Amino acid sequence: MGFYIEGMGEAVISFQNEEFRVDSNTLTQGNFVQTSQQAYDEDDVDFETSFFATSRGETTEAKQLFTWKVEFTQDFSTGKLFINAAQCVTPGVIMIKDLAFSAVAEDKNE
């Protein structure tokens, strides 16, 4: 099943000795919301997903591809997923603060 992944809030990361703030509204793939495919059971879902994000530091601004290891539990009563990025797995990047995501299952009727 596919899920639409949308970022909420911002992440603070350390990259090349500079702290960057990554705003969730930059977490898109092209002009579309990132869609990921996962195999999952009723309780837990673990997957990796990538986003292009504009990161702003004190002296630089860059658009970079970040890969996140995501772990979340689905609440079937609401039909929504609440996701916390467990770690940023992009080489050379240290994640300082978790970035939360929300996701909803694709509507097959549209």
Image (cartoon, rainbow, N blue to C red):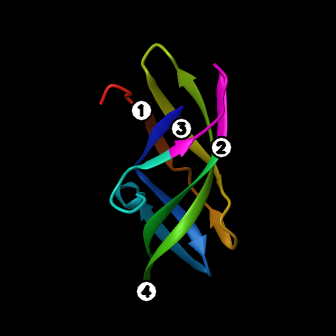
Q: Which residue is mark 1?
A: 106
Q: Earlier in the sequence, mark 1 or mark 2?
A: 2
- Tell us which disc is closer to us: 3 or 4: 3
- Judging depth in this view, the residue of 61 and 96 nearest the camera is 61
Look at the image and say whether residue 51 sits in the magenta stretch.
no
Numbered range of the magenta stretch: 36-46
Residue 47: assigned label:
2
What's the distance in space between the residues labelled 1 and 2, CA to CA? 17 Å
- Dots 2, 4 in contact, CB < 8 A: no
- Dots 3, 1 in contact, CB < 8 A: no
**In the image, is 76 to the left or to the right of 23?**
right
SS state under label 3: strand
SS state under label 1: loop
Residue 59: assigned label:
4
SS state under label 4: loop
For image coordinates 37% across by 28% down, the residue present is: 107
Specify the amino acid type for callout 2.
Phe
Quadrant in the rendering for residue 22? bottom left
What's the distance in space between the residues labelled 3 and 1, CA to CA? 16 Å
Q: Earlier in the sequence, mark 3 or mark 4?
A: 4
Q: Which residue is mark 3?
A: 83
Specify the amino acid type for callout 4.
Thr
- Judging depth in this view, the residue of 3 and 59 nearest the camera is 3
